Image (cartoon, rainbow, N blue to C red):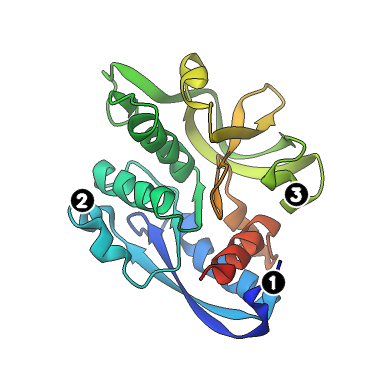
Amino acid sequence: MRLCCQRMKRLRIGLIGDYNGAVTAHRAIPLALELAATSLRACQVETIWLPTETLAEDVAARMDGLHGLWCVPASPYTSLEGALGAIRFARTKRVPFLGTCGGFQHALIEYARNVRGLAQADHSETNPAAALPLISRLSCSLVEQEGQIFLQAGSRIHQIYDRPEILEMYHCNFGLNPVYEALVATGQLQITGRDRAGEPRVLELNDHPFFIATLFQPERSALRGQVHPLIRAYVQAVNSCP
């Protein structure tokens, strides 16, 4: 595969979320992208924050000029519909997409609603009375914890890490409700990483240039000055797209 690493390019990556300087992930993500781009020696990265309330109406207009999208942690978002609209844009327009924590949760909701036809799929944090609480509180909180994740052989995430199990940092209280896993994890959307208890921690969309979401925060590695393999692969995918 020919990579665009033969020329320097400026990549504009949209961060779907409502910036809060007190959120560790929000401070780490621009740095993580910069470290990844520098390691590739191929491109520069510019991050553009996309407040979810600005995405609630004309999503396509806000996407103009962006090369990739990352749905960031720290939900609930100001506008659920804005976040879902941006994720749908990434999925349908084949824009390289990465989602972490809240991004994982909302990628599942978007897919459930718009692909699986589960219009009532919702997040129990923002809608405790949801008829279909697709995203529910985890039985064990994963805030500020490290845990093992086992990767599905042959998956894209397995290829990126080049090993069957990884150790990552969590900062999440919500995840996929196991009652509804069979309703969404079919077809093109696959769960490709699970923790020791078998709970989903990574999902990816087949037949897409790059669409991966994690219930962990790889961006935190940047605060230790480390280039994370997943973020490097994401930037490489963004750089390789036309």
The residue indicated by pointer 3 is: 159
Task: Say whether residue 21 is visible.
Answer: no
Q: Secondary structure at mark 3?
A: helix
Give the label on residue 47, or none.
Answer: none
Mark 3 / mark 2, whichever is N-terminal: 2
Quarter of the image with the N terminus in it? bottom right
Task: Say whether residue 11 is visible.
Answer: yes
Q: Compute the Cα span from label 3 to label 1.
A: 17 Å
The residue indicated by pointer 1 is: 2
Asked if 205 appears above or below 141 in the picture, the reply is below
Q: Secondary structure at mark 1?
A: loop
Q: Residues within 10 Å of mark 1 (few under 14, many from 20)?
A: few
Circle 1: residue type: Arg
The residue indicated by pointer 2 is: 56
Point out the frontmost of discs 3 and 1.
1
Between residues 179 and 65, which one lies in front from this camera angle? 65
The spot of residue 11 in percent (x, y) is 49, 75
The spot of residue 193 in percent (x, y) is 66, 35
Asked if 233 appears above or below 151 in the picture, the reply is below
Circle 2: residue type: Ala
Q: Compute the Cα span from label 2 to label 1.
A: 37 Å
Mark 3 / mark 1, whichever is N-terminal: 1
